[in-house]
Amino acid sequence: MNNTNMDTFKEEKIVLHRVKFGILLILEIPSIILSLLFLIFFLTHQTVLRVRQNQGLILLLFINFIQVTFDLPMVMHFNRLGHVSPATPAYCTWWTFIEYTLDGISEMLMATISIQRHIFIFRAHMFNNRLYRYLLHHTPLLLCIVYPISFYLTVIVFSSCDGTQWDYNSNVCGFANCYIIYNKILATYDFSMDNGFPIVIIILANVTLLIRVIRQKLRRRGTVSWKKQRRMTVQLLSISLLYFIAWFPNILIGLIQQLLIPTFLIGIQFDYIFDLLYLICLLLPWICLGLFPEFTRWIRKLLFHRNAAHNIVRPRNNLS
């Protein structure tokens, strides 16, 4: 590549990074505001928090809030500068640990929530039993947090190599973790089991849930209220579609690179495909609006009281 082509390539990269930074900034601010409103709502409405079928979604929104406030700013910082800063192995190690861990927790929580939704709709009485509550509700949610933290601490933080493999000109340091580069078996396991398998569960669980609810409605047995469950089912399908769109291209390309062609679509992957994952943390709060009608009523109530107070103050000011 001659100097002219190199300069053109650098200019295109600079433009691409600036466009990404602008898009992420525009989407991040409303996402943070909405996530904060969700947190305030849950803290001030303990009855909603105590509803068992809400707890998994609330935990997912909390993890999503951590992503959009701690992980995403590092991505935006990279796109603003066009390079990793500080360019040190320690920074890259902890950045990838945070990125992988939060992504893994998010995926596994969504997969668990999708499975548990079947029980809540069709076998809700099972949770009346204390043993089943721990086995089918509390323990799976806890494992979704503990397993990714433990796994990525082991393979990223405690098993780091000399640090020369990091790419400081690529997002998330080129995702150049030691186990991905030097251990194909572990990397393939991570891609397939920690990323691919939860996505398959999310899609299958939500599609089968929709089929089961429709069949129950057609049978007219009355054990499941279609009007009550339709909104929840459609919203969960929307979330599962978001996860599928973000993760499937990344998983497919990653597996091909690990098993067949190491450089397969690597340019497109780093410039565009990886960035699809950030759509999850940016758009998830908006999709969850439909899952918590109490929250939307609370927002309308706040806006109504604010407008009412403003209308009361204005006539008094006019009279004075």
Image (tube, helix red, strand yellow):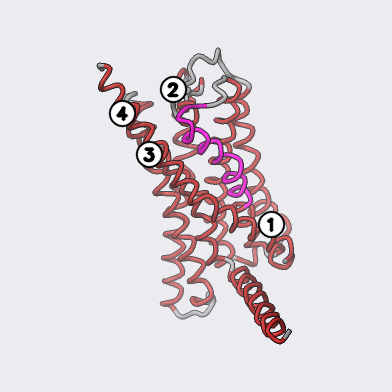
Mark 4 is surrounded, within 10 Å at the Cα level, by few (under 14), some (14 to 19) or many (20 or more) other residues, namely: some
Query: Mark 1 — residue?
Result: 133
Point 49% across, 54% down: residue? 283
Mark 1 is surrounded, within 10 Å at the Cα level, by few (under 14), some (14 to 19) or many (20 or more) other residues, namely: some
x, y (%) of residue 1? 26, 17
Residue 114 against residue 273 in the figure, above or below:
below
| Front label number (3 vs 2) | 3
As for residue 67 lying within the magenta part, the answer is yes
For residue 273, side relative to residue 222 (left or right): left
Query: Mark 2 — residue?
Result: 184
> Residue type at mark 1?
Arg
The foreground one among 46 and 315 is 315
As for residue 249 lying within the magenta part, the answer is no
In the rendered structure, find residue 175 and report the number of the disc placed on it: none
| Front label number (4 vs 2) | 4
| Mark 4 or 2, nearer chain start | 2
Point 70% across, 52% down: residue? 134
Query: Mark 3 — residue?
Result: 273
| Front label number (1 vs 4) | 4
Point 47% across, 39% down: residue? 195
| Front label number (2 vs 1) | 2
Q: What is the CA distance from the residue labelled 2 to the residue labelled 1?
A: 38 Å
Mark 2 secondary-structure assignment: helix
The foreground one among 153 and 31 is 31
In the rendered structure, find residue 264 and report the number of the disc placed on it: 4
Q: What is the CA distance from the residue labelled 4 to the residue labelled 2?
A: 15 Å
The foreground one among 193 and 308 is 308
| Mark 1 or 3, nearer chain start | 1
| Mark 4 or 3, nearer chain start | 4
| Mark 2 or 1, nearer chain start | 1
Please provide the residue range marked out in magenta. 62-84
